[in-house]
Image (cartoon, rainbow, N blue to C red):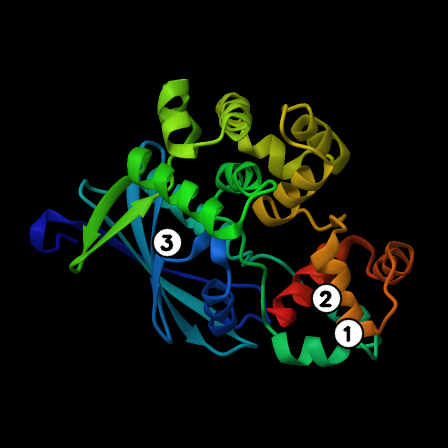
Amino acid sequence: MIHERGLYSEEGSLRPTPPFDFAKSLDFLGTFPPMHEDQTVSEVSMTKAVRVGGRTIVFQLNPTGTIKMPGLRYTLFDDHPFSRGLTDLVVDRVSFFLSLSDNLDQFYRTAINDPNFAPILQKLYGLHQVKFLTPFECACWAVLSQRNQLSAARRAKQALLERFGTSLGVKGHVYRAFPEPGQLADASKEELKSLIKHERREEYLGNVIRAFNEVDERFLRTTEYDKVEEWLKNIKGIGEWSARLILLRGLGRMEKVAVEKRLIAAAARVYGKPMTEQRLHVIVEKYGRWKGYWAYYLRTAGA
């Protein structure tokens, strides 16, 4: 379909694995500082840009159905006609971003038998993890936020977005997509330094750009967890905490969690003090391969 101003559109539907509550995904985006202002959100819709296959696509999502029989209606916008292959790439990215295929049955069966955690489960029932839109964006955030104030990290990310991101205007609003690794690969050290304003982070960001420009995302999504973690930690500037952040929030790999002060504090509020790393590990081990979802729900409830 061709819209005014020469925009093309493509429509279709998605079937998330139930239970799925799109409203809770939107609520989460409203409390997640790294992605503030990256999309427009209403009570029942989200519109956002993504860079896929060298094209900047804007997608709009609206819920259909119910939490137990959920659906999402999507509309894609581009200034060139869509091909089947491009549409499939965008739909895969959107599905991955919102973790639509995650089956939470086992996680919920464990959580309902955890008396301290059960109220959180009830509060967030139907929430699937909202990731960073791409693992590369997550890796960039991991570097920008290292030993940095949240507001300063956000400004640095916004500077990258405005300098190297590409945009598309839809219905009077300009949506800007975070750049792909290849778009940043040709950036000079001077350009990055002027935007990042921190020599060490600029160096680490350059390392991340080169590494992600050479890796197939399918490797990151599907290869054994420990091998992907090792690959990430071989990038100078990505330590254990950053690697596990990328695995969890950029790739949806739930097998392990990064234990840090904010998670310990969130656990203490739910399970009582004192909360030590040792006690936290005992609690989280009950969740098996769903450790990451336990941590995600814990943090989200605290926010």
Residue toward you, 15 or 158: 158
Which residue is identified by label 1?
Answer: 270
Mark 2 lies on a secondary structure that is helix
Residue at 49 percent across and 42 percent down: it is 134
Q: Is any atom of residue 112 visible in this view?
A: yes
Q: Is any atom of residue 88 visible in this view?
A: no
Residue 144 to residue 254: above or below: above
Question: Dot 3, how many residues are within 10 Å of its Cα: few (below 14), some (14-19), or many (20+)?
Answer: some
Residue at 45 percent across and 66 percent down: it is 30
Q: What is the C-alpha distance between the residues marked 1 and 2? A: 7 Å
- Residue 280: x and y in percent read 85, 59
Indicate left or right for 202 with 105 as reference.
left
Q: Which mark is residue 251?
A: none
Which residue is identified by label 3?
Answer: 38
Which residue is identified by label 2?
Answer: 266
Number of labelled discs?
3
Q: Residue furthest left?
A: 5
Identify the image quadrant of residue 288: bottom right
